[in-house]
Amino acid sequence: MPKSEITLSRTHRTALVGCLVGLCAVAVAPFFLDTYFTNVLIRTLLLAAVVMTVDILWGYTGILTFGQSAFFGIGAYACGLVFTHYGFGPGWALGGLALALGSAAIVAAGTGWLAFFHGSSPIYASIITLALPIVLTQVIYSGGSYTGSSSGLSGFPTYFWSLEVWFWIAGSFLVSTTTAGWLLVRSDFGRVLVAIRENEDRSAYLGIPVSRIKTMLMVFAAMVASVAGFAYAAFSNVVAPELAGFQLGTELLIWTALGGRATLLGPVFAAIGIDTMSSWLSGAMPFIWKLLTGIAFVGVIVALPRGLAPLISGLWNRLRPQRHAIPFEANIVKASATRMLQGSFGDAPPLRIEGLSRRYGSLEVLSGVNLVGKGTELLGVIGPNGAGKTTLMRCISDGKERTTGTLYINNVEIASSSPQQVVGLGVGRSFQNTNLFETLTVSECLKLARYRIDGTSLFSRSDTIALPQPSLDILQATGLDKKLSEQTQNLSHGMKRGLELAMVLATEPSVLLLDEPTAGLTRPERMAIGSVLTKLTREFGLCIVLIEHDLDFVRAISDRVVVLHQGAILMEGTVEEVVASDLVKAVYAGHKEEEVA
Ligand SMILES: Nc1ncnc2c1ncn2[C@@H]1O[C@H](COP(=O)(O)OP(=O)(O)OP(=O)(O)O)[C@@H](O)[C@H]1O
């Protein structure tokens, strides 16, 4: 059996064992607890499940959300409203639960649509999620006798099961959702979430639908929170605006931070510990308990900015006998019948630009650019600093960048397509600055690049990555094929550039935009990359647009050269024509604009 299969089954086995241990603990715990603590723990276990969703959203995906309390409140009020105003019984309970799930999903989808549009900043999403509980609380306040206004609803008919039964329901819910969350963050999809957190723009330029993934994640997290809220209302027989409020939303974040972001179990245990302790302190020291918890919170954040879980796992790793983890070994194979390997993208020129301009306020960075990039052609774009070369790349790879003009990729107008949609049209872009996912391994990065074509697994890790031949060539030329389980932050600069190129090629582009791909590389590394690029045009029919300052490199590999100067095309021709041109020499010598014109 290959190693990777052992790792894969290990993950699921660990999840199964963890789930069973958790369920056993839940089954026996009520027999060791008094009534007061059982009561407190039922609420705490339900809130811990909500904290787990906050950790997936914030810790793993980087969405700082204050809004999970709103979904908890939606679930609680769905229960309170249905049981108070409409009816009580199994049918009504199921109807209320469906209402909770549906309302939470719709509100979360609306919030995601508002917060995660292409180009929105993370702080914008935080402000939207901050507004959500505030708005919802106001809606509850203005609901009069229907919502119970500031007093909420209480005394409605519900299931008055014993505390043990409610404890088992809350505990099983927490254990099952946490097991699912644990498998999710360890799966291939979990790596996609980390990639979005680490470098959202780069993820989009690999064709990953960042906004859609974030919105879907928010919808599922909201649904889990709403079920917890529904169960809490049915158990406690009380709903109040505070359940949907901003204060609870902030507490959920604090518990996540204290437990340790992106550790999943840390925030879950922190929620259980802190909420239980707070309940005890509020009874034992009613006047100073908030001060004490505040001081403890500040102390932990200052001393342990990454939370408690990394400290505890560090201590545990020191104490237990050293065991070497089996690294996750990916099996790289050649992708069969890829579009690239067929070497054909039809008769139309892969890239056509007509009348392109880009303004930043009153500054016109590009004006009236017309350009055609043919298949099997390496088009060098040169020009002095600030000429507009990178802006040109940005306009080709993002439909919302340009001010005017029309762009076609393989005869399809890009209109106002987002970067991931432009990747779908066949554009691959590498960046001027090496732009990778620092904590992911080489194989995880390559798998990300195949997301658009091969999809991803939600609850498991696949050990096989199918790559097109040019990606395999780059891996071999740079030695990356021997470093598949290495984190990218440990790679040399040359290897990082190589990996970036291999990732872009893994998306199977027909138009490849390269912004100084050999900057900072040694001569042998430049030669290796140069020969791969030449092969890409000759054998695979790609249209490559290459920005370079190294004129010798451009001369060695380009079929045609375009000179940009002050946002306009100054000259276009063969390498020899451009190099011999007095106009170009004058531009590079820094002569005044009038002299050049
Ligand atoms: N977001 C922005 N807002 C305002 N001005 C910008 C913005 N981005 C670029 N510019 C300006 O546009 C001009 C062209 O920038 P660009 O990065 O495209 O040049 P370049 O030819 O790629 O230069 P280099 O070779 O130094 O990378 C510069 O004057 C730059 O200051």
Image (tube, grey):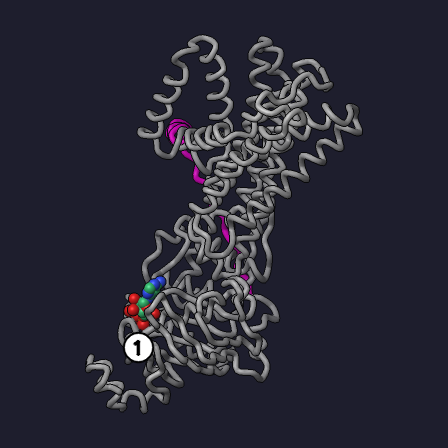
Of residues 505 and 144, the one nearer the viewer is 144
Q: Position of residue 560 (x, y in %)?
A: 39, 85
Q: Is residue 198 above or below residue 472?
A: above
Q: Identify the image quadrant of the C terminus.
A: bottom left
Give yes or no for residue 323 being in the magenta stretch. yes
For ligand 1, tell me if the residue under mark 1 lies within 8 Å. no
Of residues 94 and 207, the one nearer the viewer is 94
Residue at the disc numbered 1: 566
Q: Is residue 274 above or below residue 348?
A: above
Of residues 594 and 396, the one nearer the viewer is 594
- The residue type indicated by label 1 comes to Gln
Please tell me how crowded label 1 is: few (under 14), some (14-19), or many (20+) other residues with Cα within 10 Å.
Answer: some
In the image, what residue occupies the spot 36% across and 60% down? 434
Ligand 1 quarter of the rendering: bottom left
Q: Position of residue 154 (x, y in %)?
A: 65, 18
Can the viewer see residue 295?
yes
